[in-house]
Amino acid sequence: MGQNAARPRYAVGLMSGTSVDGIDAAVVAMGSSPDGRPLAELVSFRNMPYPSVIRDEIFALFDPRYATVDRVGRMNVLLGELYAEAALTVIAEAGLAAADIAVIGSHGQTIWHAPEPEPAAGYDIAFTVQIGEGAVIAARTGIPCVSDFRAADMAAGGQGAPLVPFTEYVLYGERDRTLLLQNIGGIGNMTVLPAGCGADEVIAFDTGPGNMLIDGLVSKLIPGMTMDKGGALARKGSVNAALLEELKREPYYRQPLPKSTGRERFGAAYVEKVAAYGQDNGLSAEDLIATVTMLTAWSIGDAYRRYVINRYAADALIVGGGGSYNPALLDLLKREMATFGVPVQTQEELGRSSDAKEAVAFALLADYALAGQPNNLPSVTGAKRPAVMGKIAYPCRP
Ligand SMILES: Nc1ncnc2c1ncn2[C@@H]1O[C@H](COP(=O)(O)OP(=O)(O)OP(=O)(O)O)[C@@H](O)[C@H]1O
Ligand SMILES: CC(=O)N[C@H]1[C@@H]2OC[C@@H](O2)[C@@H](O)[C@@H]1O[C@H](C)C(=O)O
């Protein structure tokens, strides 16, 4: 990337995930190792929770009947303002000035993801919508901003997701160990980095729900709570075997790769169905939460069994994302992976910041985009060719 090892280039990464918990902002020092491998070192990091009115409005926008063009347009610009503030805050906390930052990479907030093409007026149309206007971020910060990354991969025939595996390949690939990197955010996603692999050997896909079903049931059934903090509710309940078997039949788990998913499948309507089953069968909120926690752990083990084990035997599964802070989920995942002889460790146990990982990834992806370098992994997303993902907005010059 042409970075000079003596003088770091700084970039900012901004991530708002499918859990809609807020903005992860990171300042990253970009460099390269003596063997030419990119390095991205975290300098400062902050999670800024969305104000609850914003969070509620984003959730409302997940319903296409509510998400009218004026509401989406307003939120697009409003999020641009919040992202710019988050960037400026984290830059100041790093002891830096805007002039020190080469680029901001902003993922935006996904409000719709439809990666499977459907016919429209004679064309096959797949699309994805991430909002948070990059032009506003660039104008308010004075820093070039790369945003709307997924569209270029989709235009090349890909799913537009997952994108972080490119950075995992670049930053974390090992010569002698095959690693499974499992993110448990709103959605779960797995990256397989075979020992000494090339870019076209990386396997990565969304495994299914991460915390989305757990959060959805907690929010619906437990007043004043939005997550199962520490896994306490799951631990109080019992897994309902009949419901678990029913939920395992969801066709997504069997869908061939490449694949990605989101709230359109595992969001409010799905949670309603699980809650209705609970009511009809006399299950407590804790039983339902225990059951979907088990389902989430199972779906990760099932993905490894279905798509990976016949090609690669993993040496370790490294888990990150908010789900790694849920010990009930983590224990179940350890039990699932133990059946394959795969040990589970968290990013934190390895001394890495799990919270910052995706924000760091978007800083790196933006650095590639600004340099005009391809930054997708066609073997992962199914794109027909490499693409330079991200739209660049330049700041207004006085
Ligand atoms: N202490 C905790 N105990 C239990 N669960 C937790 C805890 N902390 C975070 N979580 C879970 O993690 C979720 C947030 O995870 P994360 O920030 O990784 O998601 P995201 O980045 O929005 O999602 P995605 O990676 O799908 O885009 C919360 O909504 C909650 O369910
Ligand atoms: C469309 C979209 O926002 N997808 C997210 C979501 O959250 C996790 C998983 O589903 C992954 O596919 C993706 O995010 C990460 C950042 C990615 O692209 O790698």
Image (cartoon, rainbow, N blue to C red):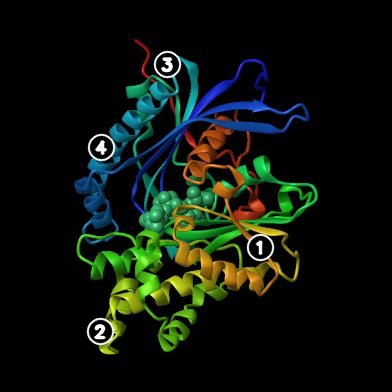
Task: Tell me, yes or no, if residue 122 can be seen here.
Answer: no
Q: How far apart are labels 4 and 2 at the CA level? A: 39 Å
Which of the two marks, 4 or 3, is nearer to us in this view? 3
**Quarter of the image where the C terminus is located:** top left
User: Which residue occupies 31% across, 29% down?
Assistant: 85
Which residue was labeled with disc 4? 78
Relative height, residue 328 to residue 31 (above, below): below
Disc sitting over residue 343 in the figure: 1
* Disc 2 Cβ-to-ligand 1 distance below 8 Å: no
- Image position of 88 (left or right of 337): left
- Secondary structure under tag 4 reads helix
Disc 1 or 2, which lies upstream in sequence? 2
Q: Is 7 on the left-hand or right-hand side of 226?
A: right
Residue 137 figure quarter: top left
* Residue denoted by label 2: 279
Residue at coordinates 71% horizontally, 46% vertically from top-left? Answer: 173
